[in-house]
Amino acid sequence: MSEDTTEEIMGATYCALCKHGYAALTMQNIADESGLSKAALHYHYDSKRDLLLAFLDYLLDRFRERIDAADADDPAERLAAFVDVVFTPRREDTHREFKTAVLEIKAQAPYDDGFRERLAEFDRLMHDRVRSIVADGIERGVFRGDADPDDVASFVITVMNGANARYVAVGAPVGDARRTLMAYLETQLFADGRDPEVAAE
Amino acid sequence: MSEDTTEEIMGATYCALCKHGYAALTMQNIADESGLSKAALHYHYDSKRDLLLAFLDYLLDRFRERIDAADADDPAERLAAFVDVVFTPRREDTHREFKTAVLEIKAQAPYDDGFRERLAEFDRLMHDRVRSIVADGIERGVFRGDADPDDVASFVITVMNGANARYVAVGAPVGDARRTLMAYLETQLFADGRDPEVAAE
DNA sequence: CGTAACTAACTGGCCGGTCAGTCAAATATC
DNA sequence: GATATTTGACTGACCGGCCAGTTAGTTACG
């Protein structure tokens, strides 16, 4: 399959997911968004499931690129940059819809090993990132030595999950969670007693 | 409809949801769990959606009872009791399955006003509870005066959402999130500098 | 010409919802 | 108080629509 066709199908899958959500997503929806017929999709992917797994792999690649791109020297800046990447939407217009579809997929993880595997990879990626940033900060003496990089990382990822879930379910603004999370990190990681409100900006 | 029949159907809905999940749930599944036929369910509820909305109302009632029952005098104890209620499963055996179904429903909220409304009520219930406990603690001088009850409440609810979502999606233990959350509350709410690790126990 | 990429039309299965009855218990009628 | 009528709860069979996946045939291309 050509590079173009792959991109076409992945893009169409993204649009169809945003428009209809995961639960109501049909192969026809994806076909309609692309310039292809439903049968053409089945020509390239054996099943709907296979296509969606490929889509998750596609998202994983893009996500890897984005967090790798957002880097800095100072641990505090690196952490802020990472939080930025996770909380800042790529596309403003379809943000809520996409987050919704992702949550739908997360809720399907227990029923499908392939899905669970990909989502675990996302989780691992984020967790490792935060953990290594925190560990690096401690090593350099920028962060408090009594902080546990693993615990901090788990907590950060959990808050991110919660912010998205709550945003989708009841429309709670993710910005609030982000602010409080940054304030938490300030108090948790910095040895001095900086005012969190100021430091979070 | 008799009290017994209502209870029968709600119980069957709970079991069917745990067994099949929300996405794959059929009226036949619910009928099979109850002693009734599929047509009988349609006799009592106009549609599958109506039945599920009634089920959410049923869950809301039970949840209200549970958090009202878990009370205490000391604000710190009240907060701990509330966290307990949210994190401790009613049924150990179907815990994961039920949390999964709830997440599936949360992800459907944007597509259905009725669902969203019920979930918002859950959220409001929890938020109000935490907010009033924190406000009460501050008033009594037990908690730090610079804590914002609203912010704390939002953050706590967000972490709870995240713990469940991450548990469902990748199997991350909710106990970890709970421990870190309690430690956060200790450092955030208590004026003195107690060791969070010890205080969380 | 042969292969890869594609399409239109179709198949089979599933599921929400409907419908024509059944039946026992309550209510009315004489 | 015996009989007729109504009602509420329920069932089994069925229908229409939807959707993943298939197939047989068509087009593009090297």
Image (cartoon, coloured by chain):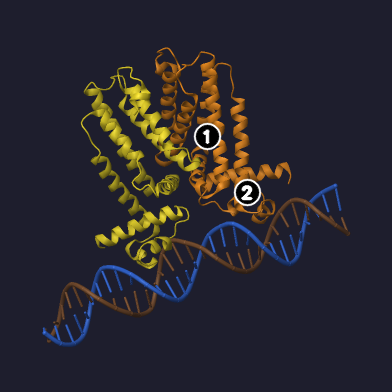
Chain colours: A orange, B yellow, C brown, D blue
Residue B122 is left or right of residue A125, and the answer is: left
Question: Circle 2 marks a residue in which chain?
Answer: A
Reading the image, the residue beneath label 1 is: A92
Which three-letter amino acid code belongs to the residue tagged 1?
A: Glu
Q: Specify the label residue A51 is tagged with.
A: 2
Residue B43 on image: x %, y %:
34, 66
Mark 1 touches mark 2? (CB < 8 Å): no
The residue drawn where x is 32% and y is 24% is: B148
Classify B81 as above or below B3: above
Identify whether B62 is placed above or below A138. Answer: below
Residue at screen point 67% across, 42% down: A7
Secondary structure of residue under mark 2: helix
Q: Residue A119 in the image: x percent, y percent?
A: 55, 40
- Give above or below for B36 relative to A50: below
Residue closest to the eye, B195 or A18: B195
Of badges 1 and 2, nearer the viewer stands 2
The answer to which quarter of the image holds residue B196 is top left
| Image x and y of residue A88, in percent | 52, 30
Q: Earlier in the sequence, mark 1 or mark 2?
A: 2
The C terminus of chain A lies in which quarter of the figure?
A: top left
Mark 2 closeness class: few <14, some 14–19, many ≥20 residues within 10 Å: some
Chain name for mark 1: A
Q: Which mark is residue B90?
A: none
* Distance of label 1 from label 2 (alpha carbons): 25 Å
Q: Vertically, is B155 above or below B110?
A: above
